[in-house]
Image (cartoon, coloured by chain):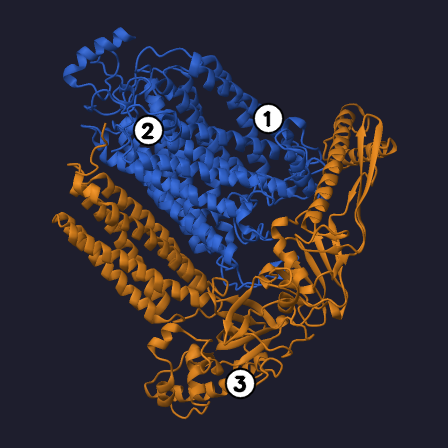
Chain colours: A orange, B blue
Amino acid sequence: MEIPYVVTPRKDTGLNNSKIAIWLFLASEVMLFGGLFSAYIFLRIYADYPWPERALAVLPGLVNTFILIASSVTVVFAWASLKLRNWRAFQGFMGFTVFCALVFMVLKSIEYNSKFHHHAVRTSEYSSVEGHVHYFEEGHGSGSGHAGGESSDKSEGSSDGHKYLSITGETLEGGKHIDHNFYVVDPTAGDANVTFDLDRFHPDYDKYINVIIGCAGKGKITLAKDYWYTQREVSGNSVKVTEKILFKEGSVLALRDEKNEESVISIAELQEAKDAFLLARKHEQKIRTKAQRVAGAALTKALKEDSLLRGMSRWEDDAVKFRDKVLKEELAKLEANGQFDSDYAKAASTISFSVAKDAHLIRVKPSWGFMTGKETGKDTNIALLDGTLITGIAGDSSLPIAVDALDFTHLVMRAEDKGLDADALIEESLLFDSQVDATGQLRTVWEAHKKWRALFAAELAKKGKVPTENDKYRVTWHQMVAYHRLDYQIDNLGEVKKVTPGLFEDFKGANHKNKEEVKAYPELRIPRENMVLDSKLTPKWNNYYGIYFTITGLHGLHVIGGAIVLGYYLFFGRKMYDSNPDWLANRVEVGGLFWHFVDLVWIFVFPIFYLM
Amino acid sequence: MGDDHHNPNFIQKYIFSTDHKMIGIQYGITALLFLLFGFFLMMLMRWSIAYPNEPLPEWLGFAFNEDWKARWLTDGKVTGETYNMFGAMHGTIMVFLGVVPLGFGAFGNYVGPLQVGAIDMAFPKLNMMSYWLYLVGGLMMCGSFFLESGTAKSGWTNYPPLSSYADSQHPNQFFTGQTQWLLGMVFLISSSLLGSVNVITTIVNLRAKGMTWMRLPFFVWAMLVVAFLLLLAFPPLEVAGILQLVDRFTGSSFFQPTGLYQSGVGVVEQAGGGSPLLFQHLFWFLGHPEVYVLLLPAIAVVAEIIPVNTRKPLWGYKSMVYAVMVLGFLSFIVWAHHMYITGMGPAISTFFQVTTVLISVPSVVLITSMLISLWGGSIRFTVPMMWACAFLPMFGIGGLTGLPLAFNLVDLHLHDTYYVIGHFHYVVAPGILFGLFGGIYHWYPKMFGRYMNTFLGHLHFWPSLIFINLVFFPMLLQGMAGFHRRWYNGGAAYLESDPDGENVFGQTVREWIDLNELMSWSVFLLAAAQLPFIINLFTAWFSGRKVENDNPWNATTLEWNTPTPPPHGNFVTEPSVYRGPYEYSRPDADGDYYPQWVDKSETAKSNEKESADA
């Protein structure tokens, strides 16, 4: 039994099976990418914020375009070589095709990587800055003098081999580079508590606990009050009461393997408390369900027999009241019998710890939860994703950032909507505040930019054109570097152009590791309460990056998939070639059709993301 | 190719089979199990609707252990959150894991290649992968009942922004119900992509000698259209799913508007600038063609059962073929009639209103042709024919109740009420499922060489017909009185807050709420009515009456030209086709029909043989 038309085409349709299949598959793919591009159009048309235009470095995209086009040509040559029965040529052309795919993906990952490490912040006044989060010297604006998590990392963490912070970044000029993006609670400023939600707490999420203990310091977090529960087991009429105090007040919250000490609560003990809570809830639910059933049956009977309720529906007021009454009586009866009381199964659903006055700052990553009350010195609480709640007084949670792009376009758009004077608002921007821009460098940059844009506008006016909002209200890293190189003396456009980073520097993007270049980037300290969005240049930052990463990511997956298939023919196709060369040629033709489709998608991707 | 196992072992033959018939049976059994599960979830919901204050009875709560009950029920009662979980999963299971795999996966796989005279699907291994992707996707979705987050809870449509934030409080986003739903959907879409490519290629390229396009049975035409719908309509849903996954994992805001406020959190820290409307467009671009993906296999099955049992050609075969193609095309441009109240604007609403009314034309062509096919026939009321006959009026009610919903002004009143639920359940349950039940009774003798029991068949059919109407007809009445489709307590809470609230026609919830008990008990009895079917399905396998010959119904299409059950490779000799698919009532034949495979010159001889067999 052989499936027909695997290699040879059927006479009346003129097609072999896989040719039909690949065209159908591509039709489906057209709908997939069609949907994505439609989403792009929808998102761009309905955007209520300035859609970033030409935000990406063009050169890598352009190079990738030519790489894909070249590989599409060679895949056809590879197919033709098979038709000519020239195996060596096939190997050469197919090898080049797969190599192109590799180069494409390498360039793509370089592009991605730089965005994943680029920070972006939008403030409450709709101005935004981009840049890198830098390490600040001890005492530089840091409220309490503690270096918080990082000092405990050194002093206590290393002593017992624990690494409290998994967020230690790369080295910068010999010093330590730490991503200083934290929500901070300051225990020295007022009572701080850490409360675990036993319903949701899970031992797998011990990283939260580890970081909290690591920050506060060993032995600084203790149980606020006794954690206890009672449980009564009923068999027949006899009731066995088990009262149990699980943990005593003052027990120390400790790390996973710091056990074997009295009055230490670690993950295992928290799990024990959780089990106790779940058990108690189960008992309570069981007994209440039983009482509910009794009440329901009583109501059914009453609706048939009771003179007042006869003929009523169960949802009617009197029926509901009757039911509630029976339920209450039933629970009271069970309580009188000793089978149930309000303390039948009692265990708190939370377990609360207090943090010692002399503990260090508690710092958690913003992605771990939500902070309410961000202003330094005010009451705050941080709700972590596993239900853990940290309450206390907010420490200095401001974000230290070396700015390599300044953008007021969103602010301008909002101001125009409301009929406000955008330029006046910009002059009063909180980014220029002396607390934020301590060195005043950002203000200097902005003043230089205003000079540049006046010159630029004059230049354009000669051609009858006007500058765009982006020209006027966005300062890019190229411009910052150029202004810095000119020492902020902007007198003519030609000079600026001469010192502006060119195409190849553009390829690398802003370089925060270059000692000279980094001086061009003003260092700000943005108060947390003024930040409304804190992101990397990832999909979170805005929908432009969102759809860019989604479409190029899916396209990249297609490139990888195609390269694997074509690579399979290259490395394992010889057997098929020897048995039936036309079979392999058909397969390569089908793979090549897919490869052309992948190329075609990129032909759309490149202009809409890189050029428009 | 390498799928020719002469001596397949157990695993090759029954588990990782590449034979389209075994895969069809796998699809069928899996889909029936999912349908049963979806039905069970609905029974839990109906209990909560009829008896919002009563704990789940023991006979419904048996499936859950004490821990699960303590987590998801309050005093044994279904909570709103739990009800939402059941509701979302009921819809998802019934549509994506039950009806589509049963109609397209099981019948399409089993009957399709046989009817075109192919030895197997064009790509047997892809066919196997298609089944396994479906199973994995389905289990991912249903498996989330065991997760801490529970399953998806935002309805089977998963509208953001609700669904985007559902389960977002969990540290491990991967293991949450909503994420598992989306990932499971990606698996299902991949499965249907492989399935549809396979079906189309098989129909186009593997037709037997002489099987021209207009000699294809209507069933095959319907499968071809369904495959195209799946191929082209599912990718936009995949886009919606992927974008929602990106939203969930990276915090982007494709579907989140600017300044969204979340209780307990405040204004959400996000970029904003997206639109929930985008999701609805992408979702319903699949969602509406999906309705025809559900429907067409059932119509196709009924169109096969009717000519056999009326001994009359299918009336208007050609117009049915053209109608089904027009239907397929139009189904792509009606999607926004699900979105009238989103504020798209009157121009767009009007466009979609017009296309929606247009699509009723080919639907009516299909159902009218089948109705006229009955006229003057010598009807044999076999069990499959009973189901087929019930399908026609039931689907008719479903279709006619849809007309008011097509008009955007009327839809303002009826949107999101039980009327909508009643309408589409009339289409799907007594319509589509009845048709598919008929198909099971019809092809069972070919699949297993034994008839299903007729008495049990009637015991299945009549109570099902009665109770299913008692479930869904009251929904239309309640819906017109304004019952909202997502009330987990059937309106009791509404009555508490607004005891005498009237809708614009002066109807109140109070007047109609007592129907809840009737509907719920009908559901429970409907469940009991499925027991004879389950018993029948398994006992007939071993002890059913054996078929007398390979063509027990005296049918004309090619699947009856195979040994019973068909072996690997299907046909003993390569089949040739000499005539159209429905040559019944032929006075020149000794019997009353010419099968497609009978050559004119052999006619006389063949008829002799047939009458001898009978």
Residue B60's place in the image compared with B482, above or below, is: above
- Both marks 2 and 3 on one chain: no
Do marks 3 and 1 share a subunit? no
Q: Chain of mark 2?
A: B
Quarter occupied by residue B563:
top left
Q: Position of residue B223 (x, y in %)?
A: 33, 34
For this rendering, which residue is in front, B95 or A278?
Answer: A278
Q: Quadrant of the C terminus of chain B?
A: top left
Q: CA distance from mark 2 to mark 3?
A: 73 Å
Viewer-side residue, B48 vs A120: A120
Residue for point 60% across, 39% down:
B481
Question: Dividing the picture into quarters, in which one does residue A301 lie?
Answer: top right
Look at discs 3 and 1 and give the one toward the viewer: 3
Chain assignment, label 3: A
Provide the secondary structure element on which disc 2 rests: loop
Residue at numbered disc 1: B524
Q: Which mark is residue B19?
A: 2
**Split into 4 quadrants, where in the image is the N terminus of chain B?**
top left
Q: Position of residue B78 (x, y in %)?
A: 66, 37
**Residues under labels 2 and 1: Cα distance?**
38 Å
Residue to which mark 3 is pinned: A441
Determine the chain carrying the residue at label 1. Answer: B
* Secondary structure at numbered mark 3: helix
Residue at 47% x, 46% y: name it: B183
Find residue B277 and report its horizontal and vertical position in percent. Answer: 48, 55
Kind of residue at disc 1:
Phe
Name the foreground residue: A585 vs A323: A585
Residue at 35 percent of width and 86 percent of height: A498
